[in-house]
């Protein structure tokens, strides 16, 4: 009986640096979903705080001990694209990230929320798993690695209650995926909050894995 606890954080902004340091301090692994077509791209939160994506060649070993996954090239709404466009958005991003980070296989975190079966069918040709943006209704493991849901956002008002409920669930194996963006820690001034949350999480002794480790464990390739 295993309780798998995963962190899946999107966009690969400069605030990942401080967040990864925090994770390392608590010995918690995360998965980071990056857009290789948006290097150095900046938008401003409420016109004041710069949300800048990292330059991939400057990342170095930041994510060592964690996982890098694809988040598509340009973070488009995938449901607005044609199949060839989706293939390019995922295929090229995966190729670039695999080369850059020396990966033999790669996973995918959906940008925004628009990913139905049409999109999944195309994306799964390129990746080992797909993490959706839909919330799960139970802690049960998904039927296959192309429908990994999320269970909470790190800043949900009831995040501690949700995690406590997960800790008490009596399923044979169960899954909790906590998602978010590291820039939210900066713009919402949540660094101290996250520190306390990570400390809270580490107290449960969950099986904390990267998403790829979880997938390889629970959905072994034949
Ligand atoms: Zn995103």
Image (tube, helix red, strand yellow):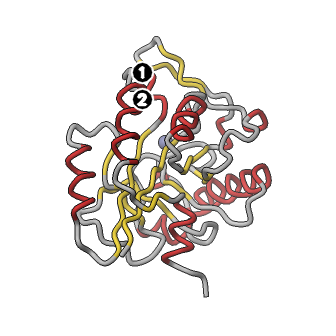
In the picture, measured across the screen, residue 182 lies left or right of residue 101, that is left
Q: Nearer the viewer, residue 159 or 88?
A: 159
Locate the C terminus and report the quarter of the image it occupies. Answer: bottom right
The disc placed on residue 187 is 1
- Point out residue 196 in the picture as x, y percentages from the top left corner: 36, 33
Q: Quadrant of residue 159?
A: top left
**Circle 2/circle 1 CB separation < 8 Å:** yes
Q: CA distance from mark 2 to mark 1?
A: 5 Å
Residue at figure coordinates x 40%, y 47% from the top left:
179
In the picture, measured across the screen, residue 16 lies left or right of residue 186, that is right
- Point out residue 29 in the picture as x, y percentages from the top left corner: 53, 50
Residue at figure coordinates x 54%, y 37% from the top left:
25
Locate the N terminus and report the quarter of the image it occupies. Answer: bottom left
Q: Nearer the viewer, residue 163 or 151?
A: 163
- Point out residue 182 in the picture as x, y percentages from the top left corner: 48, 33
Mark 2 element type: helix
Residue at figure coordinates x 62%, y 57% from the top left:
90
Q: Which residue is mark 2?
A: 184
Q: Callout 2: 10 Å neighbours few (<14), some, many (20+)?
A: some
- Point out residue 3 in the picture as x, y percentages from the top left corner: 36, 66
Position of 105 relative to 14 (above/below): below
Residue at figure coordinates x 54%, y 51% from the top left:
31
Considering every residue shown, the one lying at the far top of the view is 48
Q: Callout 1: 10 Å neighbours few (<14), some, many (20+)?
A: some
């Amino acid at each position: 009986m295993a309780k798998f606890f995963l962190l899946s954080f999107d966009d690969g902004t400069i605030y990942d640096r401080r967040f990864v340091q925090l994770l390392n301090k608590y010995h918690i692994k995360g998965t980071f979903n990056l857009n290789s077509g948006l290097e150095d791209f900046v938008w401003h939160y409420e016109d004041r705080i710069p949300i800048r994506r990292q330059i991939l060649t400057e990342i170095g070993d930041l994510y060592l001990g964690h996982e890098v996954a694809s988040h598509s090239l340009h973070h488009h709404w995938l449901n607005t694209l044609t199949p060839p466009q989706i293939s390019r958005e995922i295929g090229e991003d995966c190729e670039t990230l695999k080369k850059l980070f020396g990966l033999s296989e790669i996973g995918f975190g959906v940008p925004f929320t628009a990913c139905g079966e049409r999109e999944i069918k195309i994306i799964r040709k390129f990746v080992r798993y797909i993490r959706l943006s839909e919330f799960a209704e139970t802690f049960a493991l998904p039927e296959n690695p192309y429908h990994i849901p999320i269970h909470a956002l790190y800043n949900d008002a009831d995040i501690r209650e949700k995690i406590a409920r997960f800790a008490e669930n009596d399923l044979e194996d169960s899954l909790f995926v906590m998602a978010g963006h590291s820039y939210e820690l900066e713009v919402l001034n949540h660094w101290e909050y996250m520190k306390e949350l990570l400390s809270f999480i580490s107290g449960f002794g969950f099986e904390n894995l990267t998403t790829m480790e979880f997938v390889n464990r629970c959905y072994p390739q034949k």
